[in-house]
Image (tube, rainbow, N blue to C red):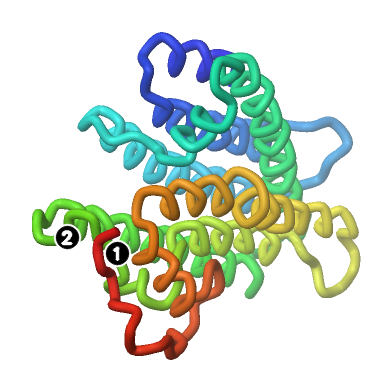
Amino acid sequence: MAAAWFIASRDGKSGWVDAIWSFAVGAAGIAMALVPWPGWQQSETRPVIVALLAAIWSIRLGLHIAVRTLRGGDDPRYAQLRGEWGKDFPRRLFWFLQIQAGAALLLAVSIFAAARNPAPQLRIGDWLGIAILVIAILGEGLADRQLTRFRENPANKGKVCDVGLWGISRHPNYFFEWFGWLAYVAIALDPTSTYPWGWIAVSGPLFMYWLLVHVSGIPPLEAHMLKSRGEAFRAYQARVNAFWPGPSRHVPAQISKGRPS
C-alpha cells in the first residue's frame, strides 16, 4: 500500500489505490492458500479451489477499477477526503492506506482458514462457498455495469443512479463485495467442530462490513454525493437502503426522483 500511495501521488489518480489493493489482497490470499505451512493439515483439492476463488475475485475487481482509472474516472471517496484533509492529504492518505493494508492481512487470514480446512472430501460447505462467490462476482459486476451505463447516458447528467440493483440498495456493489467474503466462512466452518480454526474466517466479512459501511466505503462516498447531487441524493437516501437490499420506501410527492441538484 506504500507503493500504491506513491503511484497515486505521482499519477494524481487515486483509483490506482483500490486497483493495487485488489490485486494485492488476491495475491496474498493465493499465497496463504497454496504455500505449505508446517503443522497444518489440509486436503489436496480445497486449497486450489480457495486460491482460484481469491484469484477470480481479485482479477475481476482489480481490472474493473484499473480500466475505469485509465479512462479518466476517479473514486469520489478520495476526492472527498482530499477536500477534508486539505494540504495534509498526502501524509494522512499514507496512513489511511496502512489501515487498508491491515485489512488486507485480516482478509488473507480468512482465506487461509478456509484453505486449511482438513476435511479430506469436498463438503456441502465447499459447494456453498463456491456458489456464494459466483453470485457475489456476478452481482457486483452487474451493479458496476448498470452504473457505467447510467453515467454514459448524457440525459442522466446530474442525476442519481437508481436503476436496477441501485433501486434496492444505494451501494449494491459494496453489498456484493461483502457478500463474497461469506464464501470463505462457508468453506472454513466445520459442523463437526473438529476444525475450530475455521471460525477465524468469520473475521473477513465482519471486518469488510466495518470498512465498507463505517470507514472507507459509504461515509466518504455519500458525503461527496451530497455535495455534488444535493437534494436529489437526499431524496434517494430517503427512499433506498444504504447497504442491505430491500424495497424502496415511500417519500413525499414533492421530492422529485433523481432531480438534478
The residue under the point 80% across, 67% down is: 190
Type of residue at label 2?
A: Asn
Q: Which residue is mark 2?
A: 156
Question: Which quadrant holds the C terminus?
Answer: bottom left
Q: Taking 26 as reference, is 114 above or below it?
A: below
Classify mark 2: residues with Cα within 10 Å, few (<14), some (14-19) or many (20+): some
Q: Earlier in the sequence, mark 1 or mark 2?
A: 2
The residue under the point 37% across, 45% down is: 60
Q: Position of residue 29 (x, y in %)?
A: 61, 38
Query: Can residue 5 be seen in the rendering of this structure?
Result: yes
Q: Position of residue 128 (x, y in %)?
A: 58, 71
Q: Taking 167 as reference, is 152 above or below it?
A: above
The residue under the point 41% across, 44% down is: 61
The one of 250 and 242 positioned closer to us in this rendering: 250
Instruction: Say whether residue 87 is left or right of residue 188.
Output: left
Most extreme residue toward the front is 254
The residue under the point 73% across, 59% down is: 188
Q: Which residue is mark 1?
A: 161
- Labels 1 and 2 touching (C-beta < 8 A): yes
Q: Position of residue 21 (x, y in %)?
A: 53, 31
Instruction: Say whether residue 245 is left or right of residue 125.
Output: left
